[in-house]
Amino acid sequence: MIVTIDGVAASGKSSVSAGVAQALGVPYVSSGLLYRAATLLGLEAGTDLGDARALLTCLEAAPPRLEPLASGNRVWQGGRDLTPDLHSSRVDSGVSVVAALPGVRAWVDAQLRALPQPFVAEGRDMGTAVFPQAGAKFYLTASPRVRAERRASERPEEVDAIEAALVERDRLDTLQSVPAEDAQVIDTGGLSLQGVIDAVLAGLPRA
Ligand SMILES: Nc1ncnc2c1ncn2[C@@H]1O[C@H](COP(=O)(O)OP(=O)(O)O)[C@@H](O)[C@H]1O
Ligand SMILES: Nc1ccn([C@H]2C[C@H](O)[C@@H](COP(=O)(O)OP(=O)(O)O)O2)c(=O)n1
């Protein structure tokens, strides 16, 4: 079975997916890392991030590969581990432009659909565009302030600047961030990480 966990930026998708996947004994798949890898490679090549053809040429010349380990996802390009460079503020601020390109979305979707199932998949459109047949779908939300406070522990910037950047990214990502009609929506604001994991596990269909 595929379980999808979509939601807005810093709503807890990857931490919750890791916990749910661990409880189920399956891997989780962080789709956003492939958009981040495409952005990083575009930045390093000096291409215009809105130029789909140039980005796809980069991606096809030396394709990044997502490794969905249960302990944490990694992205490789040949022998280079791109993962440590994927969460910089530079990548954060360019990624929405790259994710808006239909050609890049088709490239990412093909990578995801080729992965061996079962797994927990997290992102924006896992339950809508990529895996509409998923056995259970969730959508995580929280206020911008709560999300910025959580992210502040992982980024060098001030919480106000992080909040402003999150709100802007939410705006740019709106199109692909619509919850599936059959998704269970969880406001994570008042919950601990374990509380959200437990809510997802309680919402799974009984075997
Ligand atoms: N419900 C929660 N309560 C407190 N902290 C949380 C909660 N969910 C996630 N976090 C923390 O918030 C940060 C962002 O979570 P993350 O899983 O990276 O979100 P996303 O994948 O949606 O960007 C992490 O440091 C994570 O541990
Ligand atoms: N399925 C997905 C996953 C991510 N994206 C885009 C939108 C996001 O701004 C970036 C980065 O996603 P990621 O999940 O890593 O970002 P956050 O951790 O939520 O801040 O990629 C997308 O368009 N579709």
Image (cartoon, grey):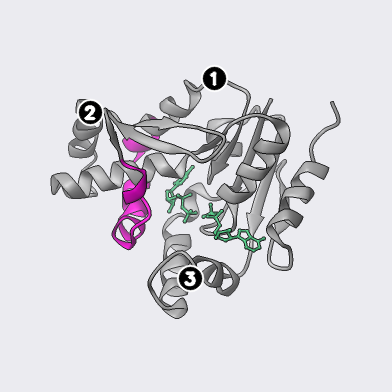
**Among the two numbered marks 2 and 3 on one chain, the one whose residue lies closer to the N terminus:** 2
Q: Where is 42 relative to 93, above or below?
A: above
Q: To which quarter of the image does residue 92 belong?
A: bottom left
Distance in Å between CA atoms under marks 2 and 3: 33 Å
Horizontal and vertical percent for residue 9? 51, 58
Please tell me whether the stretch drawn in magenta is mainly helix, strand or loop: helix
Identity of the residue drawn at 62% across and 43% down? 17
Horizontal and vertical percent for residue 20? 69, 41
**Among the two numbered marks 1 and 2 on one chain, the one whose residue lies closer to the N terminus:** 2
The boundaries of the magenta stretch are 82-106
Identity of the residue drawn at 24% across and 27% down? 60
**Among the two numbered marks 1 and 3 on one chain, the one whose residue lies closer to the N terminus:** 1
> Could you classify mark 1 by the number of other residues whose Cα lies within 10 Å: few (under 14), some (14-19), or many (20 or more)?
few
Q: Is residue 15 left or right of residue 75?
A: right
Q: Where is 203 relative to 142, above or below?
A: above
Q: Secondary structure at mark 3?
A: helix
Q: Which residue corresponds to mark 2? A: 62
Badge 2 amino acid: Ala
Q: Nearer the viewer, residue 166 or 76?
A: 76
Badge 3 amino acid: Ala
Q: Which residue corresponds to mark 3? A: 152
Q: Secondary structure at mark 1?
A: loop
Image quarter where the N terminus lies is: top right
Horizontal and vertical percent for residue 67? 44, 31
Which is more foreground, mark 1 or mark 3? Answer: 3
Badge 1 amino acid: Pro
Q: Which residue corresponds to mark 1? A: 116
Q: Secondary structure at mark 2?
A: loop
Task: Check residue 130 in the rendering and tell me which mark sits there, or answer none.
Answer: none
